[in-house]
Structure formats: structure tokens, C-alpha cells
Image (tube, rainbow, N blue to C red):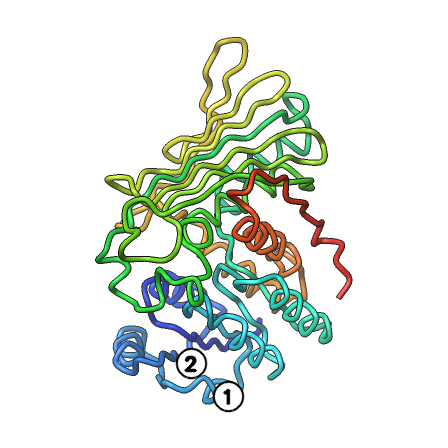
């Protein structure tokens, strides 16, 4: 079987999760890591036994099969663009970009090379509970889906925003709690609910308004074309990072995802359907699907398969976010397109 040669750009907070998964994959070999802060790259290289650099161009000239991009949000488009134009496969952390036009451009570049793959990291789709929910929806096990409610209540304080100067600014982070913390839950809502008709809602900055530009709290209402409705509440002002909670109401019962366990309430009886594998460490609340997502992406490269989350799917969430930030707080119903059908 082919040995996947891997490079990683960005050695910040999320990098260890990717690097651990690469190290564990028997078909992958980590060649080089890159970070503009050379000391970060050196530390990662020493830990994972590979080369390091502070220049993206160094990776473009190497014989690599895939490059992971784990850099600040505002850099995603430019780095992914040159990686794709170099002919390499690309695995891009969320958010794909911070505006829809850049997402469209990356899709166009990727589509131009039919053997090239552009994967987006929405790892929570691969959780056991998420897969079970999707199967129940697709099979109409409990009738039609009537509505979805989700909450993300986490903590991001001044220390978090002071760690990296790009955080907390519209131009570089692209937003706050929605685009950075709640984006995975928003992706699940639109994946579960189907094609979206309109969105509405509000957002604001209520705790760190003298320290950051972007929102720390948001409420979004999503109206699906099948007449069901989604509700999302997200805040970074909680006292801790609580597990994400999702409730799905069906014609014949209610599914509840709480503390990584999925329950069905049917005829006033509560039954545990499944649960996600236990996570460890301070970031377990992020979700546990990174390793599986990375393995699937590598398998897709080796076997020329499509078992990964592609850019056209991920672009839907970028459109939702961009339009919400532009038109929310105006008591408007904001129209959403179906990006899966976009022609670029």
C-alpha cells in the first residue's frame, strides 16, 4: 500500500491532535512541519521526529502527497490556494475560509484537477452519535424530523484571546463564537436538517466587548425547506466548556445528545441508543473524530475514494455564517442557497 507523505502547516493549539493521528496511521509518514514562529515548528519537529521550516514555499517544492493547513482563519484561503495550485492534496481545518467567494475559488481550483482532493475538517460528523442521528433521519425511523435545538456553552476569556493576536478581530478571525467554536454544531444542524430556506437571529459581545471586536454570544433560527426548524444558541461566556447538547424532535419521538450520549424518548420511555468513545485531555469536548477523519482522507487518496468531507459540502456553512454576520440583528429572513448545487 502507498505510503502517504505528509506536511503540516501551523503548529498551534490544534496541531497535536493532527500530528498524533498522522503518527498513528500506518500508511502515513510525517515529513515536515511549518510555522511562521520557527520555535513552534522546531518543538513539533523534535516531538514528532521530522523536518521543520518557517516557509510555506519549502513544502510546495517537496514530494508530498498531502498538506494539512492548521493556520489562523484569515490565512486559510491564500495557503490552500498555493497548495492546491502546486498539485498537492489538501486537508483544511475549519473554517474553510472566512467568506463565500474564497470558498468558491478553492472549489474551482480543486475541481480543475480531478485526482486532487480538498478535504475540510468537520470531525464531529464522524462521531458515533452523529452517524446514528443521520441514519435515523435518513431512514425515517421515528417519522419526519420536525425540529432541532442545539446549544454550545463554552468559556473563552482574555487569556485565550491574548494567546494569538489574530483572535478576536473581524479581519483575521472572521467572527467569534459562531465561526470558531459553534461552527461544528452549525455544520451538524445543516447536515441533519437538509436544504435551508432562510436564517435569522442576532449576535453581540457582552462580556469582552472592551477587549474583542467579534461576538461572544449568538442565537440563530434556521428554517429548512422541508418546513422543519433549527435553533442554535452559542456563547463563550459560560464558566466552563460544557458538552454540546442537541435535541431532535421527530413525529414519533425525541432524540437527545447530552454528554456524548444519545438517548431516544419514545412513549415516555428513555433509552440509551449509543455513546461516543471516551475522550481524554482538556480538549475532549471538541469532539473525537479527528483521527477517523484523517484516516478516511488518506484512504481516499490511496484508493481514489470520496469518503471525506469535501469543500462543496463545507461551503454551505461559510455562506450561512457570512450572510448571518452581514444581515442578522435586522429582523430579516436571510435567504440561503444550496451550495451542493453551485456551479463554479
51, 311: nearer the viewer: 311
x and y percentages locating residue 3 in the rendered image: 52, 75
Query: What residue is shown with label 1?
Result: 62
Q: Residue at the far left: name it.
A: 159
Query: Is 176 drawn above or below residue 328 in the view shown?
Result: below
Marks 1 and 2 in Cβ contact (< 8 Å): yes
Relative depth, front residue between 305 and 53 = 53
**Is 344 on the left-hand or right-hand side of 316?**
right
For image coordinates 69% across by 40% down, the residue present is 197
Q: Count residues near mark 2 (Cα–Cα under 10 Å), then give few for <14, some for 14-19, many for 20+.
A: many
Q: Is residue 228 above or below residue 111?
A: above
Q: Quadrant of the C terminus?
A: bottom right
Quick check: 245 left or right of 280? Answer: right
Residue 31 circle label = 2
Would residue 343 be seen by someone viewing this image from the given angle?
yes
Residue for point 61% across, 65% down: 103
Give the quadrant of the N terminus.
Answer: bottom right
Q: State which quadrant residue 53 falls in.
A: bottom left
In this rendering, position of residue 123 left or right of residue 99: left
Q: Is residue 14 above or below residue 88?
A: above
Q: What SS does tag 1 mark?
A: loop
- In terms of sequence position, does the residue under pointer 1 or pointer 2 come before the other? 2
The numbered disc on residue 128 is none
- 3D distance between C-alphas at marks 1 and 2: 9 Å
Q: Label 2's element? A: strand
> x%, y% of residue 60?
52, 86
In the image, residue 50 lies at what x, y percent? Answer: 35, 81
Which residue is outermost to the top? 267
Residue at the spot 62% in from the left edge and 16% down from the top edge: 252
Amino acid at each position: 500500500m502507498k505510503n502517504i507523505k505528509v506536511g503540516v502547516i501551523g503548529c498551534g493549539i490544534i496541531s497535536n491532535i493532527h500530528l498524533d493521528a498522522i503518527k498513528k496511521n500506518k500508511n502515513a509518514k510525517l515529513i515536515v512541519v511549518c510555522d511562521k514562529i520557527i520555535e513552534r515548528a522546531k518543538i513539533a519537529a523534535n516531538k514528532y521526529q521530522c523536518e521543520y521550516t518557517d516557509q510555506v514555499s519549502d513544502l510546495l517544492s517537496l514530494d508530498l502527497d498531502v498538506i494539512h493547513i492548521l493556520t489562523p482563519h484569515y490565512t486559510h484561503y491564500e495557503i490552500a490556494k498555493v497548495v492546491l495550485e502546486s498539485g498537492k492534496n489538501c486537508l483544511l481545518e475549519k473554517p474553510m475560509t472566512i467568506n463565500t467567494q474564497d470558498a468558491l475559488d478553492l472549489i474551482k481550483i480543486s475541481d480543475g484537477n480531478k485526482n486532487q482532493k480538498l478535504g475540510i475538517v468537520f470531525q464531529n460528523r464522524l462521531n458515533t452519535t452523529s452517524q446514528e442521528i443521520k441514519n435515523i433521519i435518513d431512514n425515517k425511523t421515528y417519522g419526519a424530523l420536525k425540529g432541532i435545538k442545539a446549544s454550545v456553552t463554552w468559556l473563552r476569556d482574555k487569556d485565550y484571546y491574548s494567546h494569538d493576536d489574530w483572535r478576536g478581530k473581524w479581519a483575521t478571525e472572521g467572527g467569534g463564537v459562531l465561526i470558531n467554536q459553534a461552527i461544528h454544531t452549525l455544520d451538524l444542524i445543516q447536515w441533519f436538517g437538509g436544504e435551508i430556506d432562510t436564517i435569522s437571529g442576532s449576535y453581540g459581545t457582552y462580556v469582552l466587548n472592551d477587549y474583542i471586536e467579534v461576538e461572544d454570544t449568538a442565537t440563530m433560527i434556521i428554517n429548512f425547506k422541508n418546513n422543519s426548524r433549527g435553533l442554535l444558541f452559542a456563547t463563550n461566556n459560560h464558566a466552563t466548556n460544557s458538552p454540546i447538547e442537541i435535541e431532535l424532535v421527530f413525529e414519533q419521538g425525541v432524540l437527545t445528545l447530552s454528554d456524548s450520549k444519545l438517548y431516544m424518548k419514545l412513549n415516555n420511555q428513555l433509552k440509551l441508543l449509543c455513546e461516543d468513545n471516551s475522550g481524554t485531555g482538556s480538549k475532549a469536548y471538541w469532539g473525537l473524530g479527528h483521527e477517523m477523519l484523517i484516516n478516511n482522507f488518506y484512504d481516499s487518496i490511496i484508493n481514489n475514494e470520496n469518503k471525506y468531507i469535501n469543500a462543496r459540502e463545507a461551503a454551505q456553512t461559510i455562506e450561512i455564517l457570512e450572510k448571518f454576520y452581514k444581515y442578522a440583528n435586522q429582523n430579516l429572513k436571510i435567504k440561503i442557497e444550496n451550495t451542493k448545487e453551485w456551479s463554479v
